[in-house]
Image (spheres, rainbow, N blue to C red):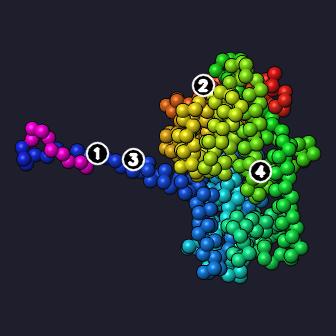
């Protein structure tokens, strides 16, 4: 409410203007919550967890504290078999189960994927072991029902007590993660406490962590990774044509047996996901600079960024430095961010957009539709492309609900001024349905499989 004196008013007259800011306040509160909460489960997100972990670490001498690292078993199989929508439902209900079975004052966070962490305050070794054991029992004994499906899950849990030997909060978290890794690889039914492991096992875990850290750093240093490019096709005409590429990292032949998701788990454990992303960025920018006369049919290349990379304070400057060093047009590079990561780190993502807003670098939000409430926050960010989440594409031609959601997203994208990309298109029927709905671009194995960078038009 504002009040002001009008020029021709009498001494007793004042103009009062009232404005209803309820919607604005609700949006502000929602965005503030998104900065600290995981949008799917409502638990603390990785950023909030790190902040709380730092505080607990600095006060670890005042009272005993413990970390419980929780990793679901068999979640990827459920996701691959039943789709992301079912997987999301499992994670959402698991979040509620964890909240219900933890103590007041303890912090439960989703770190990403199917990984959760509990920061237990004022907890003795015996108490936290009992708490972790009860969580494991609750998860395994209570099936989670999604629609007509009932899922029996189990979890591997690693525990680490606060210690004066930890040099950083990351050391503390690394021990809990190592204990969880030991529990998972040994199919342990009970939680594993790092301090209870024999020294030999602790050394083995440290050596293994050291091996992965050394291997990843070596592959970065020696350009040992490979880049494969998957075409993204323009579907606005009956005959799809090449629009641009998405860059995908691949391990060298001698390490091909390692699944890419396992590799990124190890990279995350070693705090090296940002370094991996930077290697991909540099490699793609160098490749783009090697072909300055590239035709317009390959307009740009999309590069995926992890959450840790988005949080890096110098990311914008580093990207502009790469572009300047290799003299490429900024429009040739597109940064692809997961919807979940943007919402979890909204302030950092906003700063990245603002700092690159006038450079010409493009942006794409991936897995759109993962959380439809996200539109409130994402509408403020100038994405060039919106990539629909894969679970919306599968069986699109036979699912009126999915088709309706996709049609709604297309309308939203037009209002936002963004083009749409359908990912994971595997069936011709789905492609035809997408074209009928008006999706701009599509990618998937039926349109083009990822191929080595050396074979692409970027180098010819």
Q: Which residues are magenta?
A: 1-9
> Element type at marker 1?
loop
Q: CA distance from mark 3 to mark 4?
A: 39 Å
User: Upstream in the sequence, badge 3 or badge 1?
Assistant: 1
* Label at residue 24: 3
In percent of width and height, residue 284 lies at 75, 34
Residue 160 shows in this picture: yes
- Per the model, the C-alpha gap separating discs 1 and 4 is 49 Å
- Return the disc, 1 or 4, that comes first in the chain's sequence: 1
Q: Quadrant of residue 109?
A: bottom right
Query: For mark 4, does the 10 Å Cα neighbourhood hold few (<14), some (14 to 19), or many (20 or more) residues?
Result: some
Q: Residues within 10 Å of mark 1 (few under 14, many from 20)?
A: few
The quarter of the picture where residue 98 lies is: bottom right
Q: Position of residue 144 (x, y in %)?
A: 67, 59
Badge 2 marks a residue whose secondary structure is loop
Is 22 positioned to the left or the right of 42 in the image? left
> Between marks 3 and 1, how big is the CA–CA gap?
11 Å
Vertical relation: 345 (above or below) 297: below
**Residue 327 position (above or below residue 211):** above
Q: Which residue is mark 1?
A: 19
Seen at 73% across and 19% down, the residue is 293
Whichever of callouts 3 and 4 sits on the residue coming sooner in the sequence is 3
Q: Position of residue 283 (x, y in %)?
A: 77, 36
Q: CA distance from mark 1 to mark 2?
A: 39 Å
Residue wearing tag 4: 264
Mark 2 or 4: in front is 4
Tag 3 and tag 4, C-beta contact below 8 Å: no
Residue where numbered disc 2 is placed:
438
């Amino acid at each position: 409410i504002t009040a002001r004196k009008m020029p021709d008013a009498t001494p007793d007259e004042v103009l009062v203007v009232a404005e209803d800011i309820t919607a604005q306040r609700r949006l502000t509160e929602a965005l503030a919550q998104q900065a600290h909460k995981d949008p799917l489960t409502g638990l603390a997100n990785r950023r909030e967890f790190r902040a709380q972990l730092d505080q607990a670490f600095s006060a670890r001498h005042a009272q005993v504290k413990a970390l419980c690292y929780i990793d679901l078993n068999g979640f990827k199989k459920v996701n691959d078999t039943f789709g992301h929508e079912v997987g999301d439902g499992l994670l959402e209900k698991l979040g509620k189960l964890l909240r219900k079975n933890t103590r007041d004052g303890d912090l439960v966070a989703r770190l990403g994927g199917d990984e959760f962490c509990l920061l237990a305050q004022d907890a003795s070794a015996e108490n936290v072991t009992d708490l972790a054991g009860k969580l494991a029992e609750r998860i395994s004994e209570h099936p989670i029902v999604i629609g007509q499906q009932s899922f029996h899950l189990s979890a591997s849990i690693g525990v680490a007590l606060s210690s004066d030997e930890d040099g950083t909060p990351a050391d503390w978290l690394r021990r809990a993660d190592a204990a969880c890794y030991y529990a998972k690889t040994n199919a342990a039914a009970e939680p594993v406490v790092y301090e209870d492991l024999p020294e030999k096992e602790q050394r083995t875990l440290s050596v293994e962590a050291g091996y992965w850290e050394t291997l990843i750093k070596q592959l970065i240093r020696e350009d040992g990774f490979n880049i494969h490019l998957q075409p993204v096709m323009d579907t606005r005409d009956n005959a799809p044509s090449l629009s641009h590429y998405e860059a995908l990292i691949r391990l060298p032949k001698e390490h091909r047996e390692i699944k890419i998701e396992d590799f990124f788990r190890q990279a995350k454990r070693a705090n090296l996901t940002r370094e991996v992303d930077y290697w991909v960025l540099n490699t793609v920018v160098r490749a783009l600079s090697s072909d300055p006369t590239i035709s317009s049919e390959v307009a740009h290349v999309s590069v995926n960024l992890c959450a840790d990379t988005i949080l890096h304070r110098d990311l914008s400057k580093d990207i502009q430095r790469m572009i300047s060093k290799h003299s490429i047009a900024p429009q040739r590079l597109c940064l692809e961010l997961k919807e979940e990561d943007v919402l979890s780190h909204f302030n950092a993502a906003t700063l990245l957009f603002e700092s690159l807003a006038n450079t010409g670098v493009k942006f794409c939000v991936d897995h759109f539709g993962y959380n439809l409430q996200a539109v409130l926050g994402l509408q403020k960010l100038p994405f060039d492309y919106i990539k629909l989440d894969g679970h919306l594409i599968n069986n699109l031609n036979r699912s009126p609900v999915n088709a309706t959601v996709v049609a709604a997203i297309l309308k939203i994208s037009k209002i936002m001024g963004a083009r749409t990309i359908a990912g994971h298109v595997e069936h011709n029927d789905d492609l035809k349905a997408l074209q009928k709905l008006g999706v701009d671009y599509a990618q998937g194995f039926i349109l083009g499989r990822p191929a080595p960078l050396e074979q692409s038009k970027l180098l010819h």
